Image: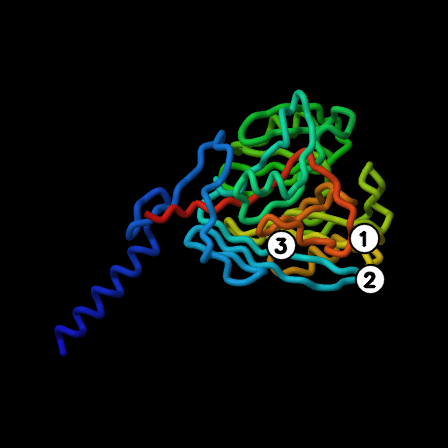
Amino acid sequence: MKTKLRLVAIVLILASLLILVPSGVNVAGAEIIEYDLDDKAGVKLQKDGYLSDLEYEDPSISVKIEKGRYCETNYVVARVKIANATQLRSMMASSYYSPSTLMGTSMAKKANAALAINGDYFPARNGKGYVARQGKVYRTKCNGEYDVLIIDDQGNLHIIKNATNEDIAAFEGTVVNGFTFGPGLVIDGVRQTGYVDNDNAALKSAQRMCLAQVGSLEYLCIVSEGPEDPGSVGLNLEQFSELVASFEGVQNAYNLDGGSSATMVFQNDKINSPNNPKRRPLYDILYFASAYQPD
């Protein structure tokens, strides 16, 4: 009996140690890696990681897709958990200095993305705002017009309202990605209100996209349909912020490019607005990569 108890105790201790092993360490013939900033794509996804048409999971990432309806409009939300911050990444369709577009599905496939969403249409805004991608800063021309999203090296989202160059310079973290579209929908747990049109169709019913953080290395990607989609009327920014804030635990949420640019890709397919044939090529994507490499 004592021998059996010892064996059980040893098994429990070993199991707890496996859970606590840090990323980058080989575990039972597999490895959870950390990416370099300049890595061009994620590792290949595991075929058996697809638990259903709406779910992917391996030891480094979990993606769960849900669908709902709000204010006579269909929406899709992806719940994502990752093992380390380097799995939240960005990709441009081409060079910042000579921008061109690709379909979101093409970029997601190229990146081996477990989930991908559109970015901020960085050539827009008449050259204003803050643009950083994978640790490289391309533009700092903030004049207080736009809210800026910064994603730091810990995978945390920071939203700077009406950002100026001085605000960006005062940021104390390490910037990995920076976006200028906005506005902030939830900032430090507080839902924002009083939206005005700032090149974002704030008062119109439209397709919407946001990235939100709900915990350490835990995120929501929420995309709503628009009036071009059969059965949906679309959301203005006030309604969209209400929807986003209704999800439990939202700490920060940032509005990204919308309209026909609103794109969510899973299993290399665009899964939002399935009955709308209109597809717009994108300048950039945000994506979540697997970090699991089996032996």
> Residue 263 location in percent, x, y?
69, 46
Front tag of 1 and 3: 1
Asked whether the viewer can see residue 146, the reply is yes
Return the residue at label 3.
Answer: 250
Q: In the depicted view, which residue is nearer to us: 291 or 212?
A: 291
Q: In the depicted view, which residue is nearer to us: 251 or 46?
A: 46
N-terminal of the pair, mark 2 or mark 1, is 1
Q: Amino acid at mark 1?
A: Gly
Asked which colour scheme the image uses, the reply is rainbow
x 59%, y 25%: residue:
137
x 48%, y 52%: residue:
61
Q: In the depicted view, which residue is nearer to us: 69 or 141?
A: 69
- As drawn, is 17 to the left or to the right of 254? left
**Distance between mark 2 and mark 1 Cα atoms:** 9 Å
> Residue 219 location in percent, x, y?
57, 51
x 78%, y 50%: residue:
277
Q: Are marks 2 and 3 in contact (CB under 8 Å)?
A: no
x 29%, y 56%: residue:
17
Q: Amino acid at mark 2?
A: Gly
Find numbered disc 3 in the image and state the secondary structure of the residue it sits on.
loop
Q: Is residue 196 above or below residue 178?
A: below
**Distance between mark 1 and mark 3 Cα atoms:** 23 Å
Front tag of 2 and 3: 2
Return the residue at label 1.
Answer: 226
How many numbered tags mark residues here? 3
> Residue 250 location in percent, x, y?
62, 54
Q: Residues within 10 Å of mark 1 (few under 14, many from 20)?
A: many
**Distance between mark 2 and mark 3 Cα atoms:** 28 Å
N-terminal of the pair, mark 2 or mark 3, is 2
Find numbered disc 2 in the image and state the secondary structure of the residue it sits on.
loop
Find numbered disc 1 in the image and state the secondary structure of the residue it sits on.
loop
Return the residue at label 2.
Answer: 231
